[in-house]
Amino acid sequence: MTATVPPRELHRAETLRAAERQAAATLAAGTLMQRAGAAAADWIVAQGARSVRIICGPGNNGGDGYVCAAELKRLGADVACVALAAPTTDDARAAAARWRDGGGTLLAQIDDAAGADLLVDAIFGIGLARPLHGVFLAAARWLNQQSCRVVALDVPSGLDADTGAWVAGGVGDADDLGVIADATLTFIADKPGLHTGDGCDAAGEVVVFDLALTIRGSALRLTAVTDFAALLVPRRRNSHKGTYGDVLVVGGGRGMVGAPVLGARAALRLGAGRVFVHLIGSSQSRFDPAQPELMFRAADGIPDACVQVVGCGLGTDALAAEALAHSLARAEQRAAHLVLDADALNLLATRAPAWRAPAPRAGARIVLTPHPLEAARLLAIDAASVQRDRIGAACRLAVASACIVVLKGAGTVIATPDGRTWINPTGGPALASAGTGDVLSGMIGAMLAQGKDAVAAVLAAVWLHGAAADDHGGDVGLVASDIAPRAATRLAALRKNASIIGARRR
């Protein structure tokens, strides 16, 4: 019953509850709970745990826990349950009664569960509507203090399955707001909140059990390499630099030359045929001794058909505003793709929420790459509101601006004006250092220059950017200039396996 076929669709709680109601109308009472508990038990046994303690809440999530315990006992495991409250649903009451009447062990208090090889969070599932409190919050904090593995059933208790934020916007240290699990065994379908925001840390490894139900048709999914297969086709030998497009990086106000150089180097490394740099802080040509292939030009010395990357170290003074206005006009007149990052977004925010991208011509697209604070400025809200619903914020900004939006952060969200949304599964805290966003902008520019589908180009760049950090293997020690070479290596490896991922030469 494990869902394994990528790309994985992500479904919101409302859809899942509707599927449960529909299934309940045709199945015997407790069938889905029995399937969930049995699937979880089988997975836990496969982990080799000798003793398991299950912390059960009052609802159906707790019922899943009691069923899991019964299955584990049947399979010969040392298992016991802690009941944090009396069951409140018919199915949960029936499951708890079967556990008790079948001789299952109920511990008097949660401290009695200490010393187990594996602890199971079955406190609350997707139906939680308010922050954890009282005995439930105390249980979550206790679980987070244990040294053994913690496995959550469906979602880590306290987490909003739709947004990846703690339910009802709880404030405080993450370890105090809900369960931080090593793995989450989620049921029926995967949930977006397990892959973005606080969910990235709370969920751990995500394993999906479909419980023999099928739900399709979501516009929200995890990015997979098949989403950008057309960009993974090996290059033809009979090609040249003109085949792979030009990128122009505009930025570099006074004292901020490094940012556009990082972006330009990344664009070159990821395969753009030619890369130009316009530093607005000086009209003089410059030279990058570490990357002499870059061409530094004044504004009037740049080819027409460049994909523009604007904002890296741009600044927000009058000169920067003039450069942005020129780039916007250039993109509209020449039907060229445009990537807006950093200070370009801060300048646009002075026009928010009224600013909207000009109607695209000949397939040209504008891509916005904000971090949460920049997105908040563009939406005229605060950054905390963005983080409480990262997916919703990205979608609203995409519609309001008529742009492709890349909302950076844990579980980067990519949203399009037509309602399609992706969460990128690659990357991690190693990217939390200066300049990594400039590199991402340059990579997006390079992929736009080479690809016919702008959305696929953006998905590819974001995925490869995160994969470069994953390949680093640690959470510190990666600097921005390390990313593009690693991403290029990963891209080369994918192209070697083009036949496996379905990419074909046309």
Image (tube, helix red, strand yellow):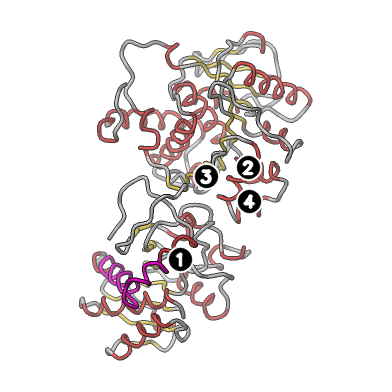
Q: Looking at numbered disc 4 in the image, what kind of residue is underneath it?
A: Val
On screen, residue 123 versus residue 337, left or right, reads left
Residue extending farthest front: 26
Residue drawn where x is 32% and y is 10% of the image = 238
Examine the structure image and report whether residue 22 is included in the region drawn in magenta: yes
Q: CA distance from mark 3 to mark 4?
A: 12 Å
Please tell me in which quadrant of the rendered image residue 460 appears. top left
How many numbered marks are there?
4
Q: Earlier in the sequence, mark 4 or mark 1?
A: 1
Q: Which residue is mark 3?
A: 413
Q: Mark 3 and mark 2 in contact (Cβ < 8 Å)?
A: no
Badge 1 element: helix
Secondary structure that dominates the magenta span: helix
Is 423 drawn above or below residue 161 in the view shown?
A: above
Quadrant in the rendering for residue 191: bottom left
The vertical placement of 91 against 47, above or below, is below
Report x, y in % for residue 346.
70, 36
Q: Is residue 184 magenta?
A: no
| Residue 284 left/right relative to 245 | right
Residue assigned mark 2: 397
Reading the image, the residue beneath label 4 is 386
Specify the segment rendered in magenta.
20-43
